[in-house]
Amino acid sequence: MGSLKIENVKKAFGPVEVLKGIDLEVTDGEFVVFVGPSGCGKSTLLRVIAGLEDSTSGRVLIDGEDVSVTPPAKRGIAMVFQTYALYPHLTVKNNMGLGLKQANTPAAEIDRRIGIASSMLSLEPYLERRPAELSGGQRQRVAIGRAVVREPKLFLFDEPLSNLDAALRVNTRLEIAQLHRRLKATMIY
């Protein structure tokens, strides 16, 4: 359902080699954290896994299938970024369900998935609010909810808490860990 294998992945920007032959295996349901100093390639590696950046060489396999040249939308990945990237004119409910609507998912299924995700993330009271009416932590939970409703094979988190204050970061880290336990999904943070 969500194993990941990276084989000798390299990424260069001109003469600068950012990823220098990365090999990694993540089993289904595992929670993996990339740690390193700013500029060491953590975000670049996540972007290569997601298909938002092409690797210079190497392979990315999801559930044993080589997805190195597969478009991002077809990889079964949901990525939560540092910025919330919410649509200001849409309600929480519509922000969470937009990707499903664009994929022509039936309305009843969209509502079911939003109901489950909003319950998990304590967003039920805010479903009819717009992003401007939410705190930073609530906005980040909406962004996470938008990923959850997609039911992806892999969740990628690219510094999703860096815009939050210290106390909220601690709390949201705990929420992400609890989400991992509930979903039993493969997550890379």
Image: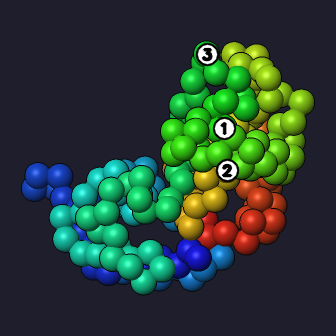
Residues packed near mark 2 inside 10 Å, few (<14), some (14 to 19) or many (20 plus): many
Residue 20, position as x, y percentages in the image: 25, 71
First in sequence: mark 1 vs mark 2: 1
- Outermost residue to the right: 125
First in sequence: mark 1 vs mark 3: 3
Residue 73, position as x, y percentages in the image: 42, 53
Task: Name the kind of residue labelled 1 in the image.
Answer: Met
For disc 1, the marked residue is 96
Task: Name the kind of residue labelled 2 in the image.
Answer: Val
Q: Quadrant of residue 132?
A: top right
For disc 2, the marked residue is 149
Task: Name the kind of residue labelled 3 in the image.
Answer: His
Q: CA distance from mark 2 to mark 3?
A: 20 Å
Q: CA distance from mark 1 to mark 3?
A: 13 Å
Residue 145, position as x, y percentages in the image: 70, 45
- Outermost residue to the left: 15
Q: Answer yes or no: is residue 62 visible.
A: yes
Side of 151 relative to 4 (left or right): right
First in sequence: mark 2 vs mark 3: 3
Residue drawn at 54 percent across, 54 percent down: 78
Q: Secondary structure at mark 1?
A: helix
Do tag 1 and tag 2 residues touch (Cβ < 8 Å)?
yes
Residues packed near mark 3 inside 10 Å, few (<14), some (14 to 19) or many (20 plus): few
Q: Quadrant of residue 18?
A: bottom left
Residue drawn at 67 percent across, 50 percent down: 149
For disc 3, the marked residue is 89
**Which quarter shows the N terminus?**
bottom right
The image shows residue 186, relative to residue 86, as above or below, that is: below
Q: Secondary structure at mark 3?
A: loop
Side of 174 relative to 90 (left or right): right
Residue drawn at 83 percent across, 37 percent down: 123
Decide which of 59, 42 is in the foreground and name it: 59
